[in-house]
Image (cartoon, rainbow, N blue to C red):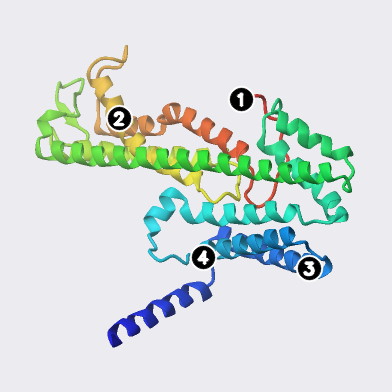
Amino acid sequence: MTELVERSGLFAAQRRGRADSPPRRIWAQDVLVRADRLQAKLNAIRADNDLVPGGSMLAEEAEARLTDAKKAARRISLRPRPASNWWRGTLVEAAYQNLHSAEILMATLYDDAQVAAEIPEAIARVEVALDRDDPRRHAALKLQDAQPADPGTRERFAKAVQVGFEAADAEHARLRSFRNAVVGSAAVLATILVAFIAYVWNHPAVMPLCFITEPGNTKVCAAGGSAPQGYDLLTVAALGVLGGLLSAIVSIRNMQGTSLAYDVPTALAALKLPVGALSAMGGLLLIKANFVPGLSQLDSQEQILAYAFIFGAAQQLLVGAVDRHAQQLLAAAPSKAASSARPEREYGA
């Protein structure tokens, strides 16, 4: 019994330590600041207004949602699983969805002046998140000329707040799924490449990266020897990785900064490394097989390594479509913190 009490006290101390520790991520700090601001606003509503029983219930539920948002931002969990939380976005989504839910509930408690002040932000959020022909977007736009004192206006305003936040959360779920697909593809490809390189290391004759030089008709391999060896494929793969890294650095120039919790640009950069190695290996294999017209043999080790590096950098031709899709998703996913202006979306974009 004493041991159980001691363990309970240790667990409580660990929970307090996590609750009191400063957040390590920017999104967590954002959630905590916004939750405190909404809590202050909710306290002011309670103090300045004589809430009916239904309003009091909504205020209590909003406060509970703010508490849960803070817990998620503080990483307070009975079974913390960092890898699972990162992959599924559990803490991020729990924090922001609770925060959004609190704002939706509080929208029905605002007075006329507060409704009038919040309508432009609600409209902007809906414009960012919904397609041009979406009827919910048209309904939200009508709030510009509505009277805040009208009960119907209040209901439409609360619905616009709900629709805007839910649409933004759906866009972020798509972005997280895309990031996971990119990271998973990079991990699987890297694992297969490592296994293949290890096999060729022990069986160099399986994939000899050697060419006949002219004049002299002597054989030169990627690692500088005159016969296939395990270092050949490893050297080519390393040059391909360096070429992919160069391509990743260049592509970062076209990536816009983002305040989103999911680091898509880093995931794309990680994908380019194994793809660069695969591109270098495949490119030299195509040259050796006389697949490229007019280019059948390489005369020196330097040429072999140079082509490996060039093929590694050229993987951008393959991954460029993935980069463009990522840009579209980043543009379609508004910031979790606030709405941002951007061109109107076409239907189905």
Q: Amino acid at mark 2?
A: Gln
The image quarter containing residue 113 is bottom right
Rounded to the nearest whole Å, what is the CA distance between mark 3 and mark 1? Answer: 41 Å
Q: Which mark is residue 44?
A: 3
Which residue is depicted at the point 62% across and 43% down? 166
Rounded to the nearest whole Å, what is the CA distance between mark 2 and mark 4? Answer: 47 Å
For label 4, the crowd category at 10 Å Cα-Cα, with few meaning under 14, some 14 to 19 and many 20 or more, is few
Q: Nearer the viewer, residue 106 or 188?
A: 106
Rounded to the nearest whole Å, what is the CA distance between mark 4 and mark 3? Answer: 30 Å
Q: Nearer the viewer, mark 2 or mark 4?
A: 4
Which residue is depicted at the point 25% across and 29% down? 300
N-terminal-most mark, 2 or 1: 2
Task: Judge left or right: residue 134 versus residue 214.
Answer: right
The image quarter containing residue 270 is top left
Q: Are marks 2 and 4 in contact (CB under 8 Å)?
A: no
The image quarter containing residue 187 is top left
Rounded to the nearest whole Å, what is the CA distance between mark 3 and mark 2? Answer: 73 Å
Which residue is label 2 attached to?
303
